[in-house]
Structures are given as C-alpha cells and as structure tokens.
Image (spheres, rainbow, N blue to C red):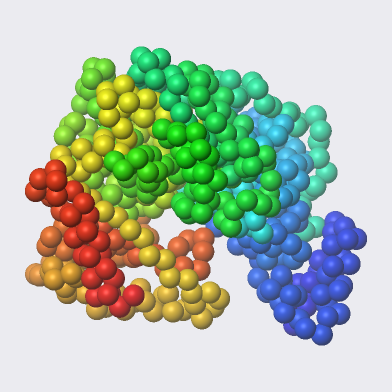
Amino acid sequence: MEVTAKAQKWLASQKVDQDTKTIIEKMLADADQTELTECFYKDLEFGTGGLRGLMGTGSNRMNKYTVGMATQGLANYLNQTFAGEEISVAIAHDSRNNSRFFAETTAAVFSANGIKVYLFEALRPTPELSFAIRHLGCKSGVVLTASHNPKEYNGYKAYWDDGAQMVPPHDVNVITEVGKISSIDDVNFDANASLIQSIGNEVDEPYLDMIQSLSLSPEAIAQEKDLKIVFSAIHGTGTTMVPPILKRMGFENVTEVKEQAMADGNFPTVIYPNPEEAEALSLALKKAEEIDADLVMATDPDADRVGIAVKNDKNEFQLLNGNQTGSLLLYYLLRKWKENGKLNGKQYVVKTIVTTDLIEKIAEKYNVKLYNTLTGFKYIAEVIRELEGKEEFIGGGEESYGYLIGDAVRDKDAIASCAMIAEMAAWAKSEGTSLYELLKNIHNEFGLYQESLKSITKKGKTGAEEINEMMVKFRQNPPSMLAQSKVMTMIDYKAGTSKDLTTGKEEKIKFPASNVLQFITADGSKISVRPSGTEPKIKFYFSVNEQISAPDKYYETIGLLDKKTQIVVKDLGL
C-alpha cells in the first residue's frame, strides 16, 4: 500500500512528465508488482557522499526527479549557510548514460534557486571538478558519476567550498535538508539561464599547469621522452586530460587504446569499467605487448582512480595493486623531495587505515610525518584542510587505486597520478632500472608487505542482517590466533577503542566512529573488516609482511606470505 501510494503521488505531481507517468501506470497495472516495489519501496538515499543507484523510474532510482530533489535540498542548505553572500557552484559529469542530462538538471535547479552555476561544456574528470571549485571560488560543487560501478548505475557526488566531499557537520546537515524535500512539487526546475555559465578551457589550462608544476624530475623526462606509454580511458573522462598532460610533461610516445578512447556509457569493451579488475586492462596490455611498451596506465570513468602494469624481471607485463603503486609513488615523492632539498620537517603524507603500512616505513626513513585516516578520500582532504598553513602536504592515497599529489585538488586525482607515475617510470629508466626493480628494492630495504582483499556479497535485507551479525560476532568473539600468530590487539573504530587482548586493557583512539574492526597479530599481520558503504558487501583486508633475508629469497618470501594469507582466511572461516 505504501509503495502504491508513493507511485500515485508521482502520478499526481504537476512536474512529472507524461512519459514517466505512462511507465508508472504500466507498473501499477502489472499483475507482478516486483518492478513497482523495487522502484518505489524506498527513497534513493542521499548519504554522506551523495546519491548512487540504478537509473530508472521511481523514488529508488536515479532520474531527473531524484536528482532534482537532492539538488533542491543542497540549494536550500547553501542559501541558509551563505545567506547574503553571492553563491556559486561548479558542475561536472562523466561519460555515463544520462550524466549530461542529470548535470543540466542539477544546473537548472541551482539556478532556479538564485545560485550561480559554472557548468562544464562536456565531460571532465572528477578531480578537475574539485580543482574548479577552489579555482573559481565556489561554495559547493557536484559531479554526476557512479565512478567504476556497472553501466546501469549513475550517481551524484556533492562537494564543499574546499573542493572536498562533505564531512561533518555539512554532510549531515545537507542530508537533513534533502530529507525535508518530501515531494517532487517542492523542487524548482525552472532554470535561470542568465545564472548558468559554460566553462571549459579556462579551467583546463590552469588545472594542467598546476599538475605540470608538481614535476620533480623534468630532466629525466627530457632524457626518456620516448618512454613507451600505453593509456586507456576505459570509455571515460581520462581521455580529456591524460594525453594532454603527458604531452605537456614532455612524453612523446604515448599510445591511446583506440577502442576505449571514445566516451561511451555502455562501456562496450569491458565487463566492469574498473581499473582494479585485470579484465578492464586486457586491451591495454595487448597493445603494450604489440609495441613493447614500458608502462601501461588505465583510468576509471570519472578518472579519479588509475591502474598500472609494468614489466617484471621476466619481461612480462605485471599488474600492480593499489598498495604497490601507492608505495612506489610515495617513495618516489619523498626521495625526490629530499634530493631536491625541499624537506624541512614540516611535510607530511596521508594514507587510510586499510592501506599498506609499508608507506609508514618509507615516511619514517625520510622523517616525514604520516597521518592515518578512515577509508574514504574525504578524510584525507579533511586532514589537508585542518593542517593548511601549518604543515605541507606532499601526497597520499588509498589501496583502492586512488592517489593525490599536492593540495590544489581535494579528491583522488588520476590525471596528476598518471603524470607522476609516468615521470617516475622515466626517472627509473634514466637511473638504469625499472619500476618493478624499484619496487623489489623497496621491499628489500623496508620489508616485503603483501596485501589482499576478499569481498563477500550479501544482497538485500537479509544480506544486510547477515553482515551485521558477522560484525557483532567478531566484536564479541575476536580470533585468538591467526596463521599461528597470537592476536594481540583489536581496534574497534565504532567504539573508538584499541584493546590489548592479552591484558584486556582498553585505550581510546582519535578517529570518527566507523564500523571497522582491525586485528593485529604478534608477527605484525593486520586484518581489517568493514562493511562497504556503497555496495552490499563486507570486505576483509589482509596485510602480512616479512623481512627478506637475502635478495635471492624475494620470490620465496612472496610464496611464504601467500601461504600465510591463505591460512588467515581459513582461520577466519571465510
């Protein structure tokens, strides 16, 4: 009855178009009410990151009306918060189906509420939207994207005036305002064209200039300008900015994967448009083998994540995971900052709690502070904002293939990351080595850290209950031994405590509350457990490490760590 009432409310609205009403009427008339229920049983939830969901008709789908209601709530909050000030917002979108339409809908609603809108003329990367907010002095911004989700999805990510996704109190306050929009009739869709300004090159150029200014080894690029790079945008926004920045940096031998260079929301050449998936890089790897490339890079649809492949010591291409790429990047940044005389004790780097502790070891060597945050780049951006003017941010990242160099952008930036990864590869080659050998050297110096991730999908209401039960069980009965090593510490980020499991002593930790558990063993292994915030999954992050006794024991040590991870998985009953 509630579902039917909600559908009838849409039918009664003056603002819902006839095509949408016809679809709803068909759903209501259908003897099988499954589709009607799925589309209307709840409202698409506006969470701390914005909206994300399947595209379609209804309150539980991404469409003109749910996007409009979210924008009306955000517009109301902006008008309250900055009363009496001139308010402007920037809007960008990716290559997904309907992204342009949703971006124009968002612009219409903002302008109808008296807010100045800078709307990108065509698709642009998410990090450029973050840059644009700060560059143009906006109070907020929105990017229409579902990142690397399947093609049926779209999303709406909201940003604050520092160019970062919202954190307390603004995220909760916006959710409250969006929640007050109880009807489509509450939304003003009547665009004020005079308040909407198209932008493009006037932001592209400063953004590319900023990234170019981050370069630490221009002489290495000049020496290795013919470095063979293969790049794939996986049908997304990376195609707009990655080739131009590589050209600006001085790279003259960049090959784009043609089949994936065309923006296409159907992502026809991949199963998932996600550079974390090996399959998504298969065409790029094929091209790299054809031309005997030095480096492969691929970005996701909104170009905030990048996956790479490098040649190993058998001259075969090997995909690196997010922890390996992040460790290489942070090592390169800190080494070059030191060599260039830029370290003075005021610099820092940031990583998330589930990202490799190898980065911490590297930071210690260079006497650079490291801050840990909860999972999510908005927390890294929050640290940058809090330390602005006091300490200098060099770079940071998370295991899920997202990295940031410099603080002009406040979200993960695959455009700047591609530029720096390419420079790092050129520098390594100029030093007579490779990125793969560099990674081996890092492991020989600091210890071999090996991370892996296991996701368990539990769909629907019963799935959510099962995930909750798993978390309760781990809290009440933490494992005592993992891979024959005693579990020494349990960190509960929800309770805000770190508990010594040998003595029972608890200490408070300084993190926002989050449903994450970590178990740390006597031999330094770390297992993190967290339900996903955007998908019906519970994720297990495994981090094991071992000192390499001799350079010729490298692969033997990898084998030992593989076995250790398998035993941990078994011990946890997964």
Residue shown at 49%/44% (left/top)? 285
Please report the residue visible at 62 percent of the width from the left and 51 percent of the height from the top: 269
Given residues 512 and 422, the one toward you in this image is: 422
Vertically, is 73 above or below 292?
below
Residue 495 seen from this side: yes
Q: Where, quadrant-wise, is the N terminus in this rendering?
A: bottom right
State the residue in front, 329 or 199: 329
Residue closest to the far bottom: 31
Q: Is residue 478 above or below residue 285?
A: below
- Left-right relation of 383 to 145: left
Rendered location of residue 137, percent (x, y): 57, 27
Does residue 347 appear in the picture of this structure?
no
**Is the residue 562 above or below the residue 245 in the image?**
below
Quadrant (top left, top right, bottom left, bottom right) of the C terminus: bottom left
Q: How many marks?
A: 0
Taking 107 as reference, is 572 left or right?
Answer: left
Q: Give the percent coordinates (x, y) of residue 57.
A: 76, 64
Q: Where residue 221 sits in the image (x, y, percent)?
A: 40, 19
Which of the pair 558/453 is nearer the observer? 558
Question: Which quarter of the figure has residue 354?
Answer: bottom left
Q: Which image quadrant is residue 541 in?
A: bottom left
User: Where residue 120 sits in the image (x, y, percent)?
Assistant: 68, 32
Measuring 83% from the left and 70% from the top, which residue is drawn there? 24
x 47%, y 31%: residue: 229
From the viewer's perspective, tell me whether residue 545 is left or right of residue 115: left
